[in-house]
Image: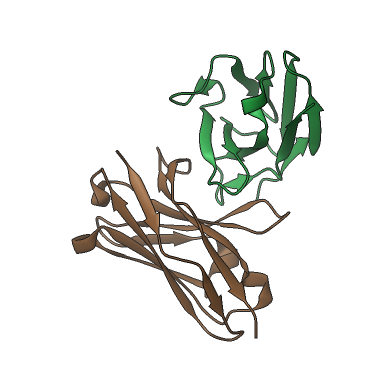
Amino acid sequence: EIVLTQSPNTMAASPGEKVTITCRASSSVSYMYWYQQMSDASPKLWIYDTSKLASGVPDRFSGSGSGTSYSLTINTMEAEDAATYYCQQCCSTPPTFGSGTKLEIK
Amino acid sequence: QVQLQQSGAELVKPGSSVKISCKASGYTFTSYDMHWIKQQPGNGLEWIGWIYPGNGNTKYNQKFNGKATLTADKSSSTAYMQLSSLTSEDSAVYFCARGYYGYTYDYWGQGVMVTVSS
């Protein structure tokens, strides 16, 4: 199965700061998906098909990448963005998730 | 609006089985796969399998073969997952999630916490 390695595991950012979370795949994947999970809540689809924002996601978020390297970027951090973000590959069975990046606000 | 309403938390004994439910509303239940995903504290998310309620077809993560059994009741728009021979390793939160173009998930249930303890 494809292993997804996220970095960093945890980080803290100040309001207005640019944030980048990376996800590396053990084999090439066609697309990457990202989910946001708030404490004690279900994950929400956040970015799909590598770079498309799910409905309601602020445009300060973006996704990019190809092959084995993908990233989620927040252009200007806001307090409401504090959450855990997971990457996920869809297209090699079984689908797998990264271990998550916990993003906190400074 | 699409909603997936899961059953309540379960406290079960080792060696027993548990069946949890996921009631769908706001869309055509038989037209989308329903996936099940396990989340253990600190262990991230694991895909268990899917069921297509339209015809009952299923596919499982090999790791969960023999552990999880997925079923669906079209008449009540409810998907079920039964977990058997429970051990402490099965203590986790279990989510149902609607499949979106295959193996991605656009709507999630609120999760069911299953605790295996004597």
Q: Is any atom of residue B33 visible in this view?
A: no
B5 left or right of A32 in image: left
A33 relative to B48, above or below: above
Q: Between residues B117 and A27, which one lies in front from this camera angle?
A: B117
B41 left or right of B50 in image: right
Pinpoint residue B83: horizontal percent, then vertical percent.
Answer: 50, 74
B109 left or right of A68 in image: left
Pinpoint residue A11: horizontal percent, then vertical percent.
Answer: 80, 32
| Colour applied to chain A | green
Q: Residue at x 69, y 19 (%)?
A: A77
Quick one: quadrant of the C terminus of chain B? Answer: bottom right
Quick one: quadrant of the N terminus of chain B? Answer: top left
Query: Residue placed farthest to the left in the image?
Result: B75
Q: Residue at x 73, y 33 (%)?
A: A103
Pinpoint residue A95: horizontal percent, then vertical percent.
Answer: 56, 47
Pinpoint residue A7: horizontal percent, then vertical percent.
Answer: 79, 34
Image quarter for residue B53?
bottom left
Q: Between residues B57 and B68, which one lies in front from this camera angle?
A: B68
Q: Is any atom of residue B38 visible in this view?
A: yes
| Colour applied to chain B | brown
